Image (spheres, coloured by chain):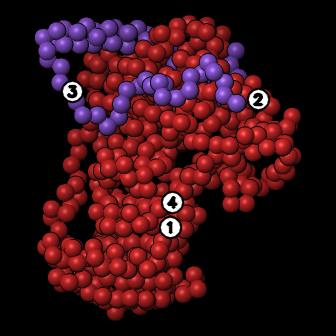
Chain colours: A purple, B red
Amino acid sequence: MYFLYFDPGLGAMIVQAVVAMAAGVLLFSKNVMYKVKSFFGLIKEEEDTYDSIDIDEKDTTTDDHKRD
Amino acid sequence: MRRTPQPMTISETNTHQASFRDPSGYMFHDGETLRRVIHPIYFPQYNKLKDSGFFKTLIDKGLLIGHEETSASAENIIITPEKIPFITNPYEWSFEQYKHAALHTLKIQKYALSKGFILKDASAYNVTFHKGKPVFIDTLSFDFYEEDTPWRAYKQFITHFFGPLVLAKFHGTEVFKMMQTHIDGIPVKLIASMLPGKTKLSSTLYTNIHLLAKMESKHSEDYKAETKVARLSKKAQSNILESLFDYIKKLELKEVTEWGNYYDKTNYDTEAFTAKKELIKSWVSPLQPKTLIDVGGNDGTFARTVLDTVPHVMVTDIDPNAVDHNYRTALKNNEYNMLPFVCDVLQPAPGIGFNNTERSSLIERLRDYAPDVTMALALIHHITLSGNVPFEKSAEFFSKFSKHLIIEFPTRTDSWVESLLVRKREFINHFDFYREEEFEKGYNKYFSLEKKEAVAGTKRILYLYKNLEHGG
């Protein structure tokens, strides 16, 4: 049951299972390639204007402790 | 800090025109301040987001716009978000800006997922540029994550972000303008039809666009919502986000514009260039502007001469590459007060959406922004000669939002003007009005002349005008 104010599109909800599978395969093979490359020392550090998808929480308060 | 609850009366007329789709709450104008009302239907989410430190982390990281709770009662909670001087819309972004806004959205969704929340919508209008980088502005966009459910805003992410970006890769950033005519993003079917056949060979593009379009048309008849929605683990959803992130991050443009290396092709030498910079600096300083816009400001070269003294500077240009260049420079130098965006002066963004008021036109936004100084350097000959706009008309345009106007007039002997005139071929005599006197006559209708000086080493004149409406 969705309390939605716009239609998410049923096709879009169903297709995500396939999208996720393809994405999983892609990420897995990327990781394998990365490991192979780093084994042979072929990894080049690239300059990056936009970092990774993950948020580094080390320097902020963690969610477990509520601050008053 | 929570203040004593005070009931607030909100008149219906003050509600923000872009804020009616989400039943969780809406924005309204309280005098000069924009505030957000939260309805009881959203209290559980809001309180959890607040108490778990979720909001705090995102705000501390500069990913979500900060806010303070102004009042709280059983009927509603009112929060006041940090003020953003100027809102740019997706169809006014350069490629890199669009890309960053997309990555920003994925980043927030992935983080939300890890904390048991989701983004319930992935509209491109939830992101804008502030302090030199993208920021998420819809505080009520978060909802609880339900175990094993797919991401309900996935399609919206494709139509608002992924689709336009992939199309831009193949067709150039002109496609971003389609966002003006499609307020809820470019339809998936249309995206799929505009992509070359070879994109079906990419697993990311095939699944996220072509297959999605197929599935959408297959299930568009399901009015009773009888079909079971697929289950999707949290890990699987994270994989989708990560692969989209990786793909978008690598996207690059292949288009070259006429203006990309504009300053390598200018028709005056270094000395004249410096003279022009000095002149601008000496005219801007005494005005002590808090806000400034450089219209047709290319990659921000001239705006940067006053960047250290003006708290908020905007540079707009028709060339997305110049805007891109400007945005990258601002990022690299941490110029938090620089806001670049794309705009064609001859057809500035109109008001769009429901009632034509959901997203304000550029002129309305500029009027509200009310820059203390407007600069228009090496622009008037393009407006007048390429756009066939009479001086009086362009003066009227600038007068709508300018207090002080610094405008450069290249005379008929300037090589750029000459080349524009030559292109008129047999109609060249129709443009005999392109003269200093005519220019001044047109501009005197709306402005009073404060200063006038020839730029040393060039065939150009710089003017400082003051708007007659502003006690000029």
Q: Is residue B335 above or below residue B278?
A: above
- Tags 2 and 4 in contact by the CB under 8 Å rule? no
* Amino acid type, mark 3: Glu
Number of the label disc, if any, that sits on residue B43 = 2
Secondary structure at badge 2 equals helix
Which corner quadrant of the image does residue B463 belong to?
A: bottom left
| Mark 4 or mark 1, earlier in chain | 1
- Tags 1 and 3 in contact by the CB under 8 Å rule? no
The answer for how far apart the CA atoms under marks 1 and 3 are is 41 Å
* Amino acid type, mark 4: Leu
Residue at 36% across, 67% down = B306
Confirm whether circles 1 and 3 share one chain: no
Tell us which disc is closer to us: 2 or 1.
1
Residue at 72% across, 40% down = B1
Disc 3: host chain: A
The answer for how far apart the CA atoms under marks 2 and 4 are is 35 Å
Residue B250 in the image: x percent, y percent? 28, 29
Secondary structure at badge 4 equals helix
Which residue corresponds to mark 3?
A45
Which residue corresponds to mark 4?
B362
Residue at 34% across, 24% down = B246
Relative depth, front residue between B244 and B74 = B74
Secondary structure at badge 1 equals loop
- Disc 4 residue crowd, few under 14, some 14–19, many 20+, Cα 10 Å: many
Which corner quadrant of the image does residue B310 belong to?
A: bottom left
Which residue corresponds to mark 1?
B290
